[in-house]
């Protein structure tokens, strides 16, 4: 881990960091997945029935 850290320190002028808050939805794959599910559910028949039809039977 230290070798990689030092490598980045030596080359930090070659990289541009993106400043994102720690809880940014850009960094949350789960949030992105739920956004896709929500968008897709808008196009489904019966989408106005609420979240119950989206649940999978166990």
Image (tube, rainbow, N blue to C red):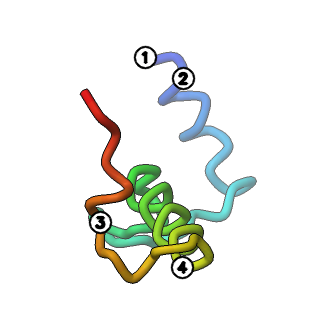
Where does residue 2 sit, x and y in percent of width and height? 42, 18
Q: Secondary structure at mark 1?
A: loop
Q: Label 3: which residue?
A: 51
Where does residue 39 sit, x and y in percent of width and height? 55, 74
Find the distance from the CA under tag 1 to the CA under tag 4: 45 Å
Q: Label 4: which residue?
A: 42
3 or 2: tag closer to the N-terminus: 2
Q: Residue furthest right?
A: 14
> Looking at the image, do the residues carrying marks 2 and 1 touch, with CB atoms under 8 Å apart?
yes
Q: The N terminus appears in which quarter of the rendering?
A: top left
> Looking at the image, do the residues carrying marks 3 and 2 touch, with CB atoms under 8 Å apart?
no
Q: Residues within 10 Å of mark 3 (few under 14, many from 20)?
A: few
> Which circle, 2 or 4, is nearer the viewer?
4
Residue appearing at x 46%, y 71% in the figure: 38
Q: In the picture shown, does residue 51 fall above or below 33?
A: below
Q: Secondary structure at mark 2?
A: helix
Q: How many marks?
A: 4
């Amino acid at each position: 881990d230290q070798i990689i850290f030092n490598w980045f320190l030596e080359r930090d002028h070659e990289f541009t960091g993106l400043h994102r808050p720690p809880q940014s939805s850009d960094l949350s794959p789960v949030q992105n997945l739920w956004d896709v599910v929500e968008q897709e559910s808008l196009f489904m028949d019966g989408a106005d029935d609420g979240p119950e039809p989206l649940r999978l039977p166990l």
